[in-house]
């Protein structure tokens, strides 16, 4: 099955009771048993739920993985991975990281003895120097948020294999439509399905996909033991969103391409961060590991925070809001919104300055989006 067909049919099975085309929302906590211990494969909905299973099979299929696991949020999916480790273990991650992941690592898991080393994962040569006998995992996001840097997944996976480390990729920005980390050698793929996968800004949900049996067993154990599972309604909504992933992503990418080129020529705009530009420092890696360049763009305007505040408050079609990946276009000011939990010095070091604006380009008519940016900047 090819990708577009998989978004609709991947991992799906015929519903036996009435031939329902969509998997029913099994809004039930428990399942009747014929005799003690003799059940249909479903005992209790924290452990197994048929609607959640349909979603888990879908993400496994889309990521070319053997297993899928669904959680109540992207962060709870990351939380399950981090609980595989023990005090003293070290994790290397990117210094240009989703703010909530940074907070989970530094404010929660550090307390339990995990050590996080943040670095620019684009410099593959320097990574080996950071690996110690305690290093267990490299955690990567690509494109990064909000600086839209690209990390070489295949290059990293070779380093991980040589050093016997796990490689986990947060694939939220790309989705499997653009990039399939497991095919590039990653061990675990993580998604905030809240974003492009569900795609309609109406659900919070996290997903994992992986192929290694033993690792999957540990994660299923963690999913059931910690219990941060998603409900059947949210599983259903995410599955429904995934069915149009390919058509939405195509339009997100098309619209973002036009906007990136428009911003590049604008005299009030300084820098535009979009991996489709030939002079983007990681353009060639983006071209080789992604099918297109995605719907996320960041840019800086010439001016101070007051001007940026005026611009970001003046949009009419774009909505000023956190989050990304929905059908509607959003504008975000990382320094005060999504990345406010990162200390200012750290933010400035990696480029999240007060005049940086991030766009999640939606699938509206492109002329309305360009007109809106034009009037807001002016
Ligand atoms: C939103 C997001 C998360 C966290 O996901 P939630 O569903 O909000 O818990 C993690 N990584 C990235 C890149 C995100 O954009």
Image: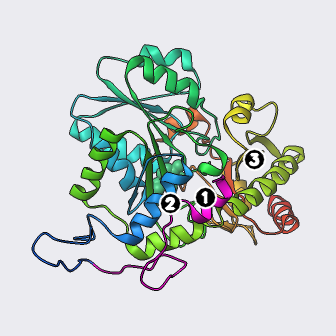
Which residue is denoted by mark 2 in the rendering? 11
Q: Are marks 1 and 2 in contact (CB under 8 Å)?
A: yes
189 vs 166, left or right, is: right
Reply above or below: 50 against 180: below
Residue 303 marker? 3
To which quarter of the image does residue 53 belong?
bottom left
Which residue is denoted by mark 1 in the rendering? 6
Q: Which residues are magenta?
A: 1-28
Q: Element at badge 3?
A: loop
Q: Main secondary structure of the magenta part?
A: loop
* Distance from Cα at disc 2 to Cα at disc 3: 50 Å
Compare marks 2 and 3 and give the one earlier in the sequence. Answer: 2
Where residue 260 sits in the image (x, y, percent)?
81, 48
158 vs 372, left or right, is: left
* Distance from Cα at disc 1 to Cα at disc 2: 8 Å
Where residue 275 sits in the image (x, y, percent)?
73, 39
């Amino acid at each position: 099955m090819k990708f577009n067909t998989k978004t609709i049919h991947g991992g799906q099975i015929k519903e036996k009771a009435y031939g329902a085309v969509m998997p029913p929302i099994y809004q039930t906590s428990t399942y009747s048993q014929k005799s003690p211990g003799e059940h249909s494969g479903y005992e209790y909905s924290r452990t197994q739920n048929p609607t959640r299973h349909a979603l888990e099979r879908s993400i496994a299929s889309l990521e070319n993985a053997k297993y899928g696991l669904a959680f109540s949020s992207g962060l709870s999916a990351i939380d399950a991975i981090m609980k595989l480790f023990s005090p003293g273990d070290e994790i290397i991650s990117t210094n240009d990281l989703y703010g909530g992941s940074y907070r989970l690592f530094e404010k929660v898991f550090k307390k339990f003895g995990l050590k996080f080393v943040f670095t620019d994962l684009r410099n593959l040569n320097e990574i080996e120097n950071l690996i110690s006998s305690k290093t267990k995992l490299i955690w990567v996001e690509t494109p990064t948020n909000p600086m839209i840097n690209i990390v070489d997944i295949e290059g990293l996976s070779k380093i991980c294999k040589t050093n016997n480390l796990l490689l986990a990729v947060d694939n939220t920005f790309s989705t499997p439509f653009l990039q399939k980390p497991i095919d590039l050698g990653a061990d675990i793929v993580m998604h905030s399905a809240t974003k492009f996968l569900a795609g309609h800004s109406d659900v919070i949900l996290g997903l994992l996909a992986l192929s290694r049996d033993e690792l999957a067993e540990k994660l299923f154990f963690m999913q059931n033991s910690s219990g941060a599972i998603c409900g059947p309604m949210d599983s259903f909504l995410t599955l429904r969103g995934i069915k149009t992933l390919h058509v939405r992503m195509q339009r997100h990418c098309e619209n973002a391409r036009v906007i990136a080129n428009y911003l590049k020529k604008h005299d009030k705009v300084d820098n535009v961060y979009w991996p489709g530009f030939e002079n983007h420092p990681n353009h060639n890696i983006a071209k080789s590991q992604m099918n297109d360049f995605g719907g996320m763009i960041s840019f800086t305007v010439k001016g101070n925070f007051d001007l940026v505040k005026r611009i970001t408050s003046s949009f009419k079609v774009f909505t000023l809001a956190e989050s990304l990946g929905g059908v509607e276009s959003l504008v975000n000011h990382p320094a005060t919104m999504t990345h406010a939990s990162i200390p200012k010095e750290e933010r400035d070091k990696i480029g999240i300055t007060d005049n940086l604006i991030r766009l999640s380009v939606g699938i509206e008519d492109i002329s309305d989006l360009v007109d809106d940016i034009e009037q807001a900047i002016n």
